[in-house]
Amino acid sequence: MFEVRHIDKTYSPGTVQQTCLFSDFSLAIQPRSFVSVVGSNGSGKTSLLNILCGSIGVDQGTILMNGEDITHLKEFRRYRRIGRVYQNPALGTCPSMTILENLAMADNKGHSFNLHPGVNRKRISAYRDLLSPLGLGLEDKLSVPVGMLSGGQRQVLALVMATMTPLDFLILDEHTAALDPKTAETVMHLTDQVVREKKLTTLMVTHNLRHAVEYGDRILMMHQGQIVLDKDGEEKKALQVDDLLGLFNSISIECGN
Amino acid sequence: MLMSILEQGLIYGILALGLLITYRILDFPDLTVDSSFPLGAAVSAVLTVQGMAPVLTLFFAVLAGCLAGLITGLIHVKCKVRDLLSGIITMTGLYSVNLNIAGKANVPLFGGDTLFRNALTKSLPAFLSPFSTLLIILIISMLAKLALDWFLSTKAGFLLRAAGDNPSVVTTLAQDQGRVKILGLMIANSLVALSGAVMCQQQRYFDISMGTGAMVIGLASVIIGTNLFRRFTFIKSTSMAVIGSILYKACVALALQMGLDASFMKLITAVLFLIILVSSQIRPKKVSLHV
């Protein structure tokens, strides 16, 4: 369970650019739920992810992970139990290292990075088995530097790496936004498969309303640091893309866009 | 002359291995080098004068370099000072430390044993003795290269490469980027100090100014090596750095041969570096200005 309670966050306090994003914001994410978050630019979606992961701090309030207060836990320590896939396919992998080396590192998450050999040869066939169902031929390119792969291939690899070791939470930060429509569908499909298989608690930010409607079991719409729509269960199933779009438009009109 | 190029090139090759870590792998413009090079030399010179076995002094030189890297790393990571400035701070401070370790600006190693002139080298067969210096340097630099190769193939080495390649991966692997950077700086400066110590043993004196331009020499070597052999992926980058260093020394020797006075040494170093940078069209990667 992931929870934020009564958080306040103001950017550039004390300057003319001062913007209050969150004020008394609370949200609880149930274990094993797959939550999609939609909303316009600047609505606070990515800030929410960054607050959960610890890349930005909060002014007030607490962040709880499985009941434990992690508000002041350093970013890298939080990732012990969090996997994250970024919008930019380049952020999830190391370009000058090979697919094998990248996988070996991801495989070692949670263990010490000591002076043992970086690649455990015995694991190579397991890596192949992990990659071959993806149908991208990555299993035959283990010794290719990741920088040579296409954006879609890198993003799939990033997803595999993020979910390789046991996790409590998966954070997806518009992870299909930089991909072409076909690859985006593939990655989204794979994501759904992994989330179900591993029963991960997942928070996905997306601009693709259809993805938000089709996948996951709860949907949130954010606007100016607040949740303006929160549906789960049957209500979520009944929700159509047009309903979301309608709400989206009405919000935008309010803002004078 | 070829001998001297090879000797000098291989000694600076160890320095180049250090810069390979900071510049190429970590993408950290580490100016500590200009002081950790003479630091290694000072430690080795003083201990040798005091009667320690020259080989053992190398160990303490490495330790000193390691500490220098640690200080730069702590300044950068813990005090959140920019990478370039952290190196400059350590470099400046170390100048005084070096002077105090050595006791004076110049320490000659008269008469006594050095790494290259001892019972062992004297016992070598006559046909080998002209090559003994080169041989010893070759052994030391190869050991340094192989050790670095080995380290880069370990889990810790992978993390070091990841830290320069894509720091966000290190964080999502639940590892502290800062610690990885500090470790990298420590290893790099250990190698640089080792290079300084060997240099001091070979030229049989320590001089406080021997580190000036060390960073430029190391960088030039790394850039020559990695650019020249870019297409040969089977050559390890560590080998490229060492070969680059030999080629660089050859270029300098050539410039001196063409009649330039030795007092132009640093100018040659700088101009040559500029030529290499421009001709390879690989300018130093953008320095990240945030911690």
Image (spheres, rainbow, N blue to C red):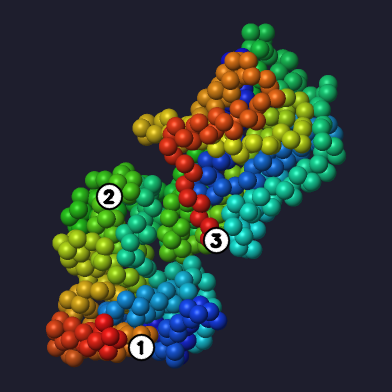
The answer to whether residue A118 of the structure is visible from this angle is: yes
Q: Which residue is mark 2?
A: A149
Q: Which residue is mark 1?
A: A226
* Type of amino acid under label 1: Gln
Subunit of label 3: B
* Type of amino acid under label 3: Val
* Type of amino acid under label 2: Leu
Alpha carbons under labels 1 and 2: distance apart:
38 Å
The answer to whether residue B139 of the structure is visible from this angle is: no
User: Which residue occupies the foreground of this view, B56 or A255?
Assistant: A255
Q: Mark 1 or mark 2, which has the lower sequence index?
A: 2
Dot 1: element:
strand
Horizontal and vertical percent position of residue B157:
49, 48
Q: Which residue is mark 3?
A: B291
**Would you say the residues marked 1 and 3 are in contact, meaning their CB atoms lie under 8 Å apart?**
no
User: Which residue occupies the foreground of this view, B228 or B177?
Assistant: B228
Q: Residue at x 74, y 20 (%)?
A: B117
Horizontal and vertical percent position of residue A169:
36, 74
Alpha carbons under labels 1 and 3: distance apart:
32 Å
> On screen, B18 above or below A103?
above
> On screen, B8 above or below B189?
above
The nearer-to-camera label among 1 and 2 is 1
Q: For the N terminus of chain B, give its image quadrant.
A: top right
> On screen, A17 above or below A106?
below
Q: Residue at x 77, y 36 (%)?
A: B208
Dot 3: element:
loop
Dot 2: element:
loop
Task: Tell me if mark 2 has few (under 14), some (14-19) or many (20+) residues whose alpha carbon lies within 10 angstroms of its own.
Answer: some
Task: Tell me if mark 1 has few (under 14), some (14-19) or many (20+) residues whose alpha carbon lies within 10 angstroms of its own.
Answer: some
